[in-house]
Image (cartoon, grey):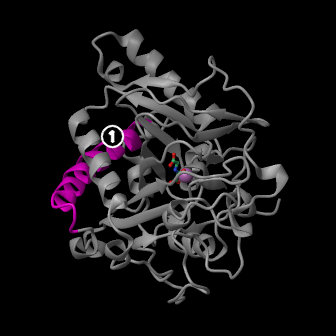
Amino acid sequence: MMNCVQMWPEPVVRVQHLSDSGIRVIPERYVKKPSERPSISEPVDKEINIPIIDLQNLYSDQESLRQETASLIYDACSEWGFFQVVNHGISHQLMAATREVWRQFFQLPLELKQQYANSPATYEGYGSRLGVEKGISLDWSDYFFLHYLPMSQRDQNKWPSVPDSCRELVAKYSEEVVKLGGKLLKIFSVTLGLRENHLEQAFGGEIGACLRANYYPKCPQPDLTLGISSHSDPGGMTLLLPDECVPGLQVRRANNWITVKPVPNAFIVNIGDQIQVLSNATYKSVEHRVMVNSEKERVSLAYFYNPKSDALIKPVEELVTEDKPALYSPMTYDEYRVYIRTRGLCGKSQVESLKSPK
Ligand code: OGA
Ligand code: NI
C-alpha cells in the first residue's frame, strides 16, 4: 500500500456491542443527514426488482436463447449496473454453509473477535469503519475483510480459526466465486463487443480477490441510519451473497432506491468503478446502500473481483470513438483505492472526479 496510516484516529466501537447493550437511542455518529436516511415507511414495490439472469442460457444449444441472454446481460450492466445470477454453477450447499460459518463467527464473544481487529494499513481482519478521517459519519455494521488473491497477499493465519471449518470453507468458496468472476469477466468482454480475453488482460493478467463478510446488527432506530452508506464499489465487479431471509440492499435507479428482493441461491452481481472506466461508461457502477432493521440481524458476503493493483486502468480503445471520447484519465487501481480508503465512502464522487476535464 502506498499510504502508511497505521492506526484508527479514535477508539473503534463495535456496532454489535452497541446493539447488544440495549440502547434505545443510537449515538450521533451513526445518525445520517435527513436527505440520506432510508425511507423505511415507504411500501416496498413488489413489482420492481433488478434483472435476473439465468447463466445456463448463455450456453444453450439454441442460438436465439444465447443471443437473448447476452443482450439481457448488456442491458442489466448498462442500465442497472446490477443483476442477480442463477444457475451459476456454484453449489448451493457451499454458499449456505459459508454464510452460516460467518454468522457463527460474528456471534462469537467480542474478546475473541478482537484478536482479529484490523487497522487502516491493510483493512484485513475484523473492522467497524471505513475511512480514517477523524469524526467521519459511521455506518451500522461490522465486517471481516480478507485477501484471497493475489497469492502473495493470501495469509490464512489472518482468517478466523474459529469456527473450525471457517478457513476451509472460505478457501473452497473463494475458489468457486473467483472462477465465476472469471467467467463473468469474459462474458462482459463479449457483450461489450470485445475479444473474450480483453477485460482479463486489461485487469493486468493477475486479478485481486478479497472477501468482506458484512454483519448488520439489529438497530433500535433504523430510520435514522444505514448499514452501509450510499457508495459504488471501487473495484472490478462484486459478487454478493445476501442474507437468505433479511432484505436490506437498495440500488439507485434514477432518483429512487429499489430494494433488491433476493432470489434463493442467486448471487447479486454488480459492476464496479474499474469496469465502468474500462467500458468508457457503457457499463455502470451504480450507487447502492444497505438498510438495517430493529428485528433481525443480517449477514452478507461481498466478494470483490479486482484488477491487479498496478494495472493502469483507462477506457479500452475500441470503446473510445469520436462520438464518445475517453471519459476518464488513466489511474492504477492502487492509487484509486488509497484515495477511497482515506476518505471513506461517498456516493459516486470518486468515479465522477476521475473524469478527465473536457
Ligand atoms: C458492499 C455492499 C451490500 C450488502 O459490501 O460493498 O454493498 O447487501 N454490500 O451487504
Ligand atoms: Ni457495495
Q: Relative to 308, is 322 above or below? A: above
| Foreground of the two, 95 or 116 | 116
User: Can residue 183 be spotted in the picture?
Assistant: yes
Horizontally, is 170 left or right of 338 in the view? left
**177 inside magenta stretch:** yes
Residue 40 spot, x, y in % from top left:
71, 38
| Foreground of the two, 101 or 6 | 101
Horizontally, is 148 left or right of 218 in the view? left
Horizontally, is 313 left or right of 242 in the view? right
Mark 1 residue element: helix
Horizontally, is 39 left or right of 293 in the view? right
Where the C terminus falls, by quadrant? bottom right
Q: Which amino acid type is shown beneath numbered disc 1?
A: Lys
Q: How crowded is the residue under tag 1: few (<14 C-alpha within 10 Å), some, or many (20+)?
A: few
What are the residue bounds of the magenta stretch?
161-187
| Foreground of the two, 308 or 102 | 102
**Magenta stretch, overall SS:** helix
Q: Quadrant of residue 129?
A: bottom right
Say how many tags the image has: 1
| Foreground of the two, 139 or 5 | 139
Q: Residue at x 27, y 71 (%)?
A: 154
Q: Relative to 145, is 67 above or below? A: above
Residue 279 spot, x, y in % from top left:
58, 46
**218 inside magenta stretch:** no
Q: Residue at x 41, y 10 (%)?
A: 64
Q: Look at mark 1 in the image and give the residue it sits on.
A: 183
